[in-house]
Amino acid sequence: MPAVKGDGMRGLAVFISDIRNCKSKEQEVKRINKELANIRSKFKEARCWTVVVICDKEKPDRCLTNLVRTVLIIVSDGEAHDSGRLKAHFVCQNCNRFGQSFEEYFIGSNQGQSIVIANTSVVDQGVFSGTASVVILDLGYLFISVLVSATSDLMKLVIMSVKNDLTSRNPVHINLALQCIANIGSREMADAFGNDIPKLLVSGDTIDSVKQSAALCLLKLIRSSADIFTVLYTDLQDYTYYFVPAPWLSVKLLRLLQNYPPPDDATVKNRLSECLETILNKAQEPPKSKKVQHSNARNAVLFEAINLIIHADAEPNLLVRACNQLGQFLQHRETNLRYLALESMCLLATSEFSHEAVKKHQETVITALKTERDVSVRQRAVDLLYAMCDRSNAEEIVSEMLSYLETADYSIREEMVLKVAILAEKYAVDYTWYVDTILNLIRIAGDYVSEEVWYRVIQIVINREDVQGYAAKTVFEALQAPACHENMVKVGGYILGEFGNLIAGDPRSRLVGNDSSNMVLGRQWDLERGEDSPVVQFQLLHSKFHLCSVPTRQLLLSTYIKFINLFPEMKQQITEVLHNENSVRNADVELQQRAVEYLQLSNVASTDVLATVLEEMPPFPERESSILAKLKKKRPDKLKHSMEPKEYKLSNAVVSSETTNAVPSVNSPSKTAVPNLLSLSGSSQSASNPAPVSNTGILIDVLGGLGGELSTDGPVSQPAASTAAPATNGLAAIGVPPVANPLLDTSASLLGVEDKSTKYLGVQQKISSKLPVTINKFIEPTDMDAQTFFMRWKILNSANQECQKIVTAKQTMDTEDVKKRLLGFGVGLLEGVDPNLENMVSAGIVHTRSSQIGILLRLEPNKQANLYRLTIRSSKADMATVLVNLLEHQL
Amino acid sequence: MMQFMLLFSRQGKLRLQKWYVAHPDKLKKKITRELITMILARKPKMCSFLEWKDLKIVYKRYASLYFCCCIEKDDNELLTLEVIHRYVELLDKYFGNVCELDIIFNFEKAYFMLDELLIGGEVQETSKKNVLKAIAAQDLLQEDDAIDMALSEYGLT
């Protein structure tokens, strides 16, 4: 009893082509009805498809395929006669929609009995999936998902067979079952498989493709009936660690989020903060277990969440909450938690939103600093104190840190010293406090006070007049202590050498400053006690001389020669010391040289010359605090956020207070004398290395340090401008009205320099500056690779953008020298750009008020001919010519 | 990422070491020596976390054994403690009341277990059940091998 005549597939093809060829709707309906009748007759004969399959032993799959597909075609037609030409596979894809109507179509017309039976048999095939071929199974599932509505009674049967397939070892079967579940996606399905699918997903046995399907299937089910799956996570028992669900995964995910910028989308953002809030809430709940593992795992997630909150740094309430919760940990009995809380709070302190909240815990942190038994925790406490410090609590924190320093562990002393020094400087309102603090620091932990710290205190004292008298008095007192650290001697020597006169009632003290309350105090004290007379100062210093190392002694010698200038009456005594065998014949070359030279100087020079040479040190150009740089070097990672000073009030104030000597004079006989000891590149460099271009550098630094914007007005044509400048009052006056088309005037090498703020501390400042300030001072070097360089070089090809000149060398043509000159000129050197190694290539940007002009430079030396070929191209016409004219004099 | 894990006794004897970053032997020895002395010098109530170079050390003592992990600064200290604990639990479950001798004599098992727990310095499987299952499967394989070997020794294969 063959179910299908001949080739099964041909039957289907004939059917489809028949339908296609139908001229009218009636014809189509007729054809379909005929086919249906055909099928029905077959079902009648065979009762169910299994029989069909069994009957046609040779091609069971094909038979079935053919039959089902035929039915599907009809279904599609039953749905819409108009589009009766749908192809079989299209039907397969558009499943559920048809399924419903199909049943209605047949059942409704009371003819569907056999089809339902057919369905059952297909499902039966599924049940025997162990033996059934994949094609049959495939069709079975297709049939179910297409033809069976979610409410059908058949569903129970379907679920049974799907369940069987899920446990199958054959991944194809499992995948088919998963597809079926996803396609139906009903609540019943979710109920039945809510437990099985997650197991598939996490089981080690399943292969990847199955896991993928399982994940997607789960997604579908969660979307349709989420409530069932809330309990799902508790099913992952294996990954619950001491009552904390999957802590490792949670932490990994939170960590992952920290690698991305905070989300911009408002809904995502809200969702994220909800999650974070939930985590914070969970951490507040009473613990589910007393075990430390439970609390550790829970807090691990909490800390990671807090890290994420800090990373986003956008939700003030979350930040403050985090801070409060960490505050509870500060007194926790677990050392580990205290440690981590302090560490995280450090980060919180850097956020503007939570800074205040962190400050609330100041007392606790100070207690921790004092009572904590573990040095690493104390270290964290120091870090936190440093991070939470601001102007309001600086004095208290610094004094606490100082008092702790006396008993602090050796391992953290140096860092603490640096931190105290930075805080004292950063938040000093009253500089007498600053001086006191640093001197205390030297007294308490002299060994750990690095050079940078005492350099810095000297820089500040020199730059601030109002504190000089006080500083001199304080160091003098400090030096009277029987045992006194060498660093103290250094500071004392330096300060007394400069300002010893201020506390000796010297008449010259009147020259300094108008705020003289300190001086008055000093003088009164002087009159009352009479102990700090020059002789006492000198004797005090000299009593330490022999106990000190060579560098300190060198410094003291400089102090002595300064004393000769400050207190001429002491010349005799000091010359004796200098003349001493121990000095002029000292084994140390530097000491010997200083002794001999100073001695000679004091003998040869007249008082006037001496006064000029040994004049007070000029203020130091303001730079980033060297202490900060040192701390950064020490702990590069920790400092990214917390250590940057929030304000640098000092830098403005310091320079502005004493600017009359803005251009440094070489006021030391030996180039290794005092200025070099302070290792400030400014004055000593220009003294020892009189390269023509770097002379004005200091001026620019000083002007820049004034805090105002330094901007160019464009070149100025009248050289007379420079002479006009000193006559006027403020910095702004130096600014000379710009010329109409300044850049065209190639002879111009002068620029107006303007500073917008002319008053500091309410007083107009006088600056005598050395002009010209040439345009190259406004060049900022840039870095680029060869490719970019030549690309830009080629772009700047119009005639007036380039200027080329053959220049005769006026100085040595040594490559290193030329490089130095180029660097001094202000353009950066680009290494490895030009194929010829002799050539030098640079690039930079000229900053002017109105625009930024890019320049590219190429210098090709010809050593045999003693010539250079200098080519400059600039983005603005004629800038190149101006620069070539400037640079040719330097070569 | 975890950089390395060390197990050593109170006497400072190294029992197990697993490195997830490549270092020359000399450096490894140096690091080990440095850390062992550093950690043994610490008192029991002290904090389990240490800053070391730009990395973090997390250690914990179980009976006579110290477990010491070196992690990067972004890693979570508390969770690393729990990685250690999970490892100890695994050892304990496998050996049944594990002691230092178990690890000395069955160090390869301890390593296997660690490899199941951590891979390339990252946690790979935290389920105790799954790890033990994998180890059991390995043991089974080994047993089969042992039988094969025994048989082949007597020329019976």
Image: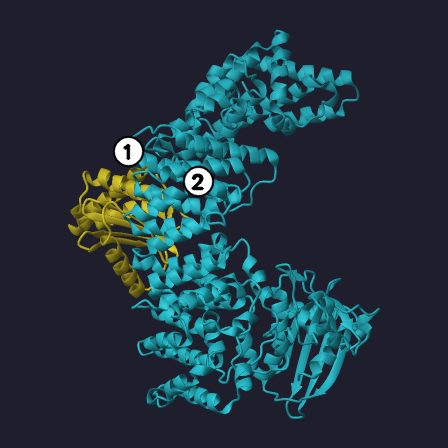
Does residue A54 appear in the picture of this structure?
no
Query: Looking at the picture, do discs 2 and 1 lie on one chain?
Result: yes
A97 shown above or below A454: above
Read off the residue under disc 2.
Answer: A360
**Which of the 4 image quadrants contains residue A608?**
bottom right
Q: Going by the image, does A216 lie left or right of A789?
A: left
**Which of the 4 image quadrants contains residue A739?**
bottom right
Q: Amino acid at mark 2?
A: Lys
Q: Residue at x 51, y 73 (%)?
A: A680
Q: Chain of mark 2?
A: A
Residue nearest the viewer, comparing A278 with A762 = A762
Does residue A543 appear in the picture of this structure?
yes
Task: Identify the disc placed on residue A291.
Answer: 1
Where's residue A91, x and y in %?
64, 25
Residue nearest the viewer, comparing A535 with A747 = A535
Residue nearest the viewer, comparing B38 with A12 = B38
Q: Secondary structure at mark 1?
A: loop
**Which of the 4 image quadrants contains residue A4?**
top right
A306 shown above or below A83: below
Could you classify mark 2 by the number of other residues whose Cα lies within 10 Å: few (under 14), some (14-19), or many (20 or more)?
some
Q: Colour of chain A?
A: cyan
Q: Residue at x 57, y 61 (%)?
A: A653
Query: Which circle's residue, 2 or 1, is located before the other in the chain?
Result: 1
Where's residue A856, x and y in %?
69, 72
Q: Amino acid at mark 1?
A: Lys
Chain identifier, yellow in the render: B
A480 shown above or below A277: below
